[in-house]
Image (cartoon, rainbow, N blue to C red):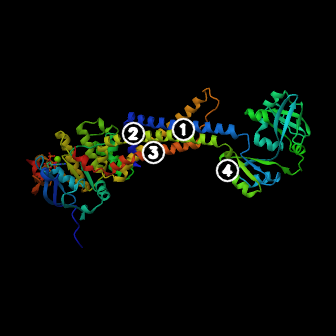
Amino acid sequence: MLSLRIAARFLKTSPGQSALIIAGIAVGIATQVFVGSLITSLQADLIDTTVGSSPHVTLLPPDGETTLPGSYAERVLDSEPLATDAVAVRDFSAIYADGDESLPLSVKGGGAAGIDGIYGLSGRLVEGAYTLADDEILVGAGFAEATGVGPGDELSLLLPDGRTGAYVVSGVFDLGAAAANERLAFTAAQTAAAALGLETDAYSAIEVQLSDVFASTEVAERLASELDAVAVDWQATNEELLSGLQAQSGSSAMIQVFVLVAVALGIASTLAISAVQKTRQIGILKAMGMGDGPAGRIFLWQAALLGAGGTTGGIALGYALIWGFSFAPVPFSIRPEPQFIAISAVVGISVALASSVIPARKTSRLDPIEVIQSG
Amino acid sequence: MAERAPLLVADALEKVYGSGDIATRALKGVSFTLEAGEFASIVGQSGSGKSTLLNLLGLLDTPTSGVVRYNGEDTGALKPSGRAELRNGLIGFVFQFHYLLPEFSVWENMVMPRLIAGVAVNDAERRRGEELLHLLGLAGLGDKNANQLSGGQKQRVAIGRALMSEPELILADEPTGNLDSSNSEAVYELFRRVNAERGTTFLIVTHDRRIAQQTDRILEVLDGELVQDVPNDYRSAEKD
Ligand SMILES: Nc1ncnc2c1ncn2[C@@H]1O[C@H](COP(=O)(O)OP(=O)(O)OP(=O)(O)O)[C@@H](O)[C@H]1O
Ligand SMILES: [Mg+2]
């Protein structure tokens, strides 16, 4: 521990130099934390907008079949640990006709709780109540505006087999996307069964939401092999978005690598200067019998102290930047990513340690006579 | 039973600095033996090789040829860590220049060899340190930064540092070179006392014959060679 004590004293006796290098590391780490959290939050926001209120994996009937058993929903929840919600739905298309005007609707029938789990409708109602009793229907804000219907109004729809179905609007939702708000509607499962002329246990799809959206591909594969069904995941249908996100992650990683390189060069050069400045002291310590190992460790400790100080300061500064950003007029907020911050801390300290290797080795090789003789 | 090996043996020590045209033969085969408890001095003109010899004996430098033995052990065969251990535990070195650590206080400098040895400084040692500071005329300066002392004070701290770890052997290179005569007197009195009370061996380099006269044995180096090695009755010298 003498090495640590000496390292601390060396740093304390040149406060200006120490403060500068700590500030340098802090700025680097703060940039890391801020940029990293910004990109991560931005992507999370984008992904949430895209798939936050839609199924991540959809199970469809296998080739040659037109329906799936409703029990699949429970089986998915039982067997798939990543599945947070699963609902058996009956999809049918219908047409709203009012004089000249006709609007196509895609109607989804399912249990009120299950539907809410996937689409979060109860939190996205703009009018009416979230109920799905027999013959009730929930419509989107766009559809409601175009047709002028509202909660309590009756709605007649032309069904695929030519019949007409009569429904009562129970609520109006806003899913945040124009297409969904104009085209999508929800009914109870038995209402959809009547419209489709289906038996009680026949469903057109099982919709699943996961705790990890990026696990959808493997989950889809697992479910397809376990159940007699075809599984489609959101990533397969959103390739462009994903490659965009990946490019963004790549450039953010590159920025971070360059920041780290700059931090490493800063620490390395400061420590190299410090090692030269302290050659005399190291020589004296060695003349008094300090071993090569402990002498070298003085600079490792210096680096560790600088790295720890700079990283702590940098994380604090990063948080401050993120907090400052919350006042910026942008439509999303940055969440500090704890995992990302942990990585920055580990990287910051390791980079500091790595950049001390050369001065530490030079120090451990120093022969005390070089100092004692040169006066 | 074999006789106990002498504390220190210098056997045909040669030291050549540089090589080719610029080679300097600073030592040309110096041999002598120092028994435990001796109080000896090395004299010689400037450039005669005194510091070179002391650096070899202090295991700070390695001879071009020849052997330094401590208690019968050939130090040339030791690993760097073994040499460092001897420097820390067996030998106390007072350099021609003080070589204090400017980042540390007087007290911290004094106990640094103990800290290097990994020894916690206890109350008894603390009292001994205080006494040393007092005897060296440095009472009350323990908490001062080593940088804030005068040259002579620094030199005395360096002497205190060598004595603090109670080594078996003190190698001192012009320890009183920049002290006035009364301070110098006090230092030699202290050395004498430590030699008498603890049996600590002293080998003191000086170019001052008067100082040498106060030791029990005088070794003279001339041009890299040991030209004289005589016992000396320092008490008779005092009477002159
Ligand atoms: N590092 C070195 N490189 C080359 N020559 C050296 C070196 N150190 C000492 N010498 C030479 O070796 C010789 C002995 O030097 P040394 O320092 O041992 O003398 P000294 O007796 O201690 O002198 P002083 O009384 O002035 O301290 C001198 O000629 C000196 O120039
Ligand atoms: Mg000399």
Q: Is residue A152 left or right of residue B135?
A: right
Residue that label 1 marks: A33
Q: Residue A87: x and y, percent?
A: 79, 47
Dots 2 and 1 on the same chain: yes
Disc tally is 4
Q: Which mark is first along the chain, 1 or 2?
A: 2
Q: Nearer the viewer, residue A250 or B134?
A: A250
Residue that label 4 marks: A217
In the picture, residue A100 is in which quadrant? Answer: top right
Amino acid type, label 2: Leu
Label 4 packing within 10 angstroms: few (<14), some (14-19), many (20+): some
Residue that label 3 marks: A351
Marks 4 and 3: in contact by CB < 8 Å?
Answer: no
The correct choice, above or below, for B149 with respect to B65 in the image is above
Residue that label 2 marks: A11
Amino acid type, label 4: Thr
What's the CA distance linking mark 4 and mark 2? 53 Å
What's the CA distance linking mark 1 and mark 4? 30 Å
The correct choice, above or below, for A371 with respect to A130 in the image is below
Q: Nearer the viewer, mark 1 or mark 4?
A: 4
Q: Chain of mark 4?
A: A
